[in-house]
Image (spheres, rainbow, N blue to C red):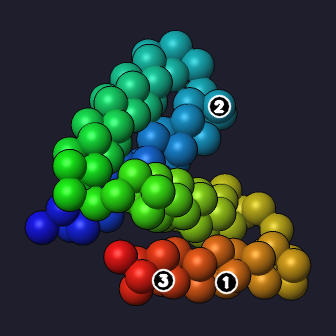
Amino acid sequence: MNWIVLVVAGLCEVGFTYSLGRAKGVTGADWWTWITAFAVLYVLSAVFLAKATQTIPIGTAYPVWTGIGAVGAVVIGILIFHEPATFWRLFFLTTLIGSIIGLKSLS
């Protein structure tokens, strides 16, 4: 169950990076909306991470959490914010995913 909570925490991290990216391009009330979403998702991400670490070792949970966030942020950046999808960027993204799977399989 706490692995599901950890994945939700990672997805909240992806959400708060997306919100931050959206806030970058707007002003006024829209900026406040995106910053509020950022703050809520940031807190939820930390709360879910703390819950997951009750049974998952921190040395595994934290890298998996940040890995989900990093992979999600890169994918969001490429698909939504039109950032470049270079060979090396995708290569290292793949190695990161492999590392996350490796940590999960050892726990």
Amino acid on which the number 1 mark rests in the picture: Thr
**Mark before the other along the chain sequence, 2 or 1:** 2
Q: Which residue is mark 1?
A: 94
As displayed, is residue 40 above or below residue 62? above
For the residues bearing labels 2 and 1, Cβ distance under 8 angstroms? no
Q: Mark 3 and mark 1: span between their CA atoms?
A: 11 Å
Q: Mark 2 and mark 1: span between their CA atoms?
A: 28 Å
Q: Which residue is mark 3?
A: 101
As displayed, is residue 98 above or below residue 72? below
The local secondary structure at tag 2 comes to helix
Label 2 CA crowd tier, 10 Å (few <14, some 14–19, many 20+): few
Closer to viewer: mark 2 or mark 1: 1
| Place of residue 14 in the rendered image (x, y in percent of width and height, measured from the top left) | 46, 53
Closer to viewer: mark 3 or mark 1: 3
As displayed, is residue 49 above or below residue 102? above
Q: Which residue is mark 2?
A: 24
Left or right relative to 61: residue 17: right
Amino acid on which the number 3 mark rests in the picture: Ile
**Residue visible at 59% across and 59% down in the picture:** 70
Amino acid on which the number 2 mark rests in the picture: Lys
